[in-house]
């Protein structure tokens, strides 16, 4: 064998082996570094997720804070605020005035139709507002709120106005517009033939005010009452000079102004010596109770009343009717201011609810 030829081959083989070892070690180091980096990233992943979650939570808190700040500084439409303040208030005043005063007395059916129509229209607008999905929620809220306010105002004005009308205004209007009679003898009257007969109430059914003759008095010794919760007190208005064939159809009346045994009658201006007149009490609800009291007087005092008429015993019926009307007007003014303050509170509630939308 040629030794010179073998040496180069051995040297090449040794070089190849050395190269293989170098490459192997290099690849091992590379894969070891890659594995270490992957493990490091794997270990760091939970910490990054926690950091990301914290950042997201902070962003949500900032967004919520910005939303609250926007709500607290949201501008309210001036027209909507004006409507919420004045529309229900005006609806209340118009309804109260329509039901309380002369329109109700002269045109009762038209008044009831007007108020019923106003209440029905406000309910219809409310239903329309809540069903209108084409509007923005804020617009639906405004429409529904104002409609509800108007419906409540109309109903409350109707209720309070009705109390004011029947309590003070209607008796005053009726007393003014019914007939007035003067110098009436409550006990006897003379026919065209000169015959004296008992004065009967049927001749004065349309009386709103009666001015009796100067000698007329209240016969408090023949008073009586009927109790049904309250005491309904009656005493006949008579001519003290009448001795025979006397009528007892005119009665001074009042509520809770006598004793339970019927005595101590102190209704109206009973102690006023100048009081010689009566103003009619047309309240239907009390008329039957006064009629029962008259029946008690008939039984107790052996008298007969064929057609009893009931009056408040006063000196000046016109002044009394005017005082009733002034009381009704005064109540209207007081309620006008109170209802305005209620409307202001309603407007403040509107502002609060708008900011919560």
Image: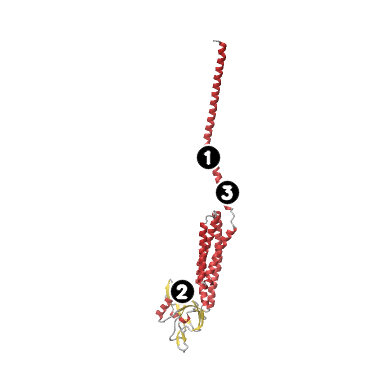
Q: Residue 11 appears at what percent x and percent y?
A: 56, 16
Of residues 35 and 305, the one drawn nearer to the viewer in this rendering: 35
Q: CA distance from mark 2 to mark 1?
A: 83 Å
Quarter of the image where the N terminus is located:
top right
Residue 128's place in the image compared with 308, above or below, is above
Q: How many marks?
A: 3
Disc number at residue 50? 1
Whole-Å distance between the Cαs marked 3 and 1? 24 Å
Q: Secondary structure at mark 2?
A: helix
Task: Say few, some or many: other residues with alpha carbon within 10 Å of mark 2 (under 14 / 14 to 19 / 20 or more).
Answer: few
Nearer to the camera, 300 or 35: 35
Q: Residue furthest top?
A: 1
Residue 156 visible in this rendered orientation of the protein: no
Element on which disc 3 rests: helix
Q: Is residue 9 visible?
A: yes
Single out the mark in the foreground, 2 or 1.
Answer: 2
Which sits earlier in the primary sequence, circle 3 or circle 1? Answer: 1
Q: Earlier in the sequence, mark 2 or mark 3?
A: 3
Q: Residue 173 has which mark?
A: none
Q: Report which residue position mark 2 lands on.
A: 284
Which class describes the residues within 10 Å of circle 1: few (<14), some (14-19), or many (20+)? few
Q: Residues within 10 Å of mark 3 (few under 14, many from 20)?
A: few
Q: Which mark is residue 66?
A: 3
Verify CB contact (< 8 Å) between mark 3 and mark 1: no
SS label for mark 1? helix
Considering only vertical position in the picture, is 151 above or below 282? Answer: above
Image coords of residue 201 (percent x, y): 46, 81
Residue at point 56%, 15% (across, down): 9
Q: Is residue 149 left or right of residue 262?
A: right
């Amino acid at each position: 064998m040629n030794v010179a030829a073998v040496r180069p081959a051995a040297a090449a083989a040794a070089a190849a082996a050395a190269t293989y070892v170098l490459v192997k070690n290099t690849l091992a180091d590379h894969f070891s570094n890659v594995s270490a980096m992957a493990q490091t990233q794997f270990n760091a992943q939970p910490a990054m997720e926690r950091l990301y979650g914290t950042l997201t939570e902070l962003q949500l808190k900032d967004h919520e804070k910005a939303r609250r700040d926007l709500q607290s500084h949201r501008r309210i439409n001036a027209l909507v605020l004006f409507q919420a303040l004045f529309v229900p208030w005006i609806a209340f005043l118009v309804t109260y005035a329509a039901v309380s005063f002369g329109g109700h007395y002269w045109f009762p059916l038209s008044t009831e139709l007007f108020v019923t129509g106003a209440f029905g229209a406000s309910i219809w607008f409310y239903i329309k507002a809540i069903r209108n999905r084409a509007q923005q929620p804020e617009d639906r809220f405004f429409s529904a709120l104002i409609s509800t306010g108007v419906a409540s105002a109309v109903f409350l004005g109707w209720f309070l106005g009705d109390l004011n009308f029947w309590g003070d205004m209607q008796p005053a209007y009726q007393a003014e517009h019914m007939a007035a009679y003067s110098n009436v003898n409550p006990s006897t009257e003379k026919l065209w033939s000169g015959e004296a007969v008992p004065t009967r109430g049927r001749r004065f059914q349309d009386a709103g005010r009666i001015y009796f003759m100067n000698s007329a008095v209240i016969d408090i010794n023949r008073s009586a009452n009927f109790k049904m919760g309250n005491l309904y007190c009656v005493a006949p208005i008579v001519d003290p000079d009448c001795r025979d064939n006397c009528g007892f159809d005119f009665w001074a009346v009042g509520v809770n102004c006598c004793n339970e045994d019927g005595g101590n009658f102190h209704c109206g201006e009973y102690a006023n010596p100048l009081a010689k007149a009566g103003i009619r009490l047309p309240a239907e609800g009390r008329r039957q109770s006064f009629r029962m009291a008259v029946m008690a007087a008939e039984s107790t005092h052996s008298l007969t009343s064929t057609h009893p008429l009931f009056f408040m015993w006063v000196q000046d019926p016109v002044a009394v009717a005017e005082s009733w009307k002034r009381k009704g007007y005064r109540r209207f003014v007081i309620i006008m201011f109170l209802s305005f303050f209620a409307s202001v509170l309603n407007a403040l509630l509107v502002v609060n609810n708008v900011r919560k939308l």
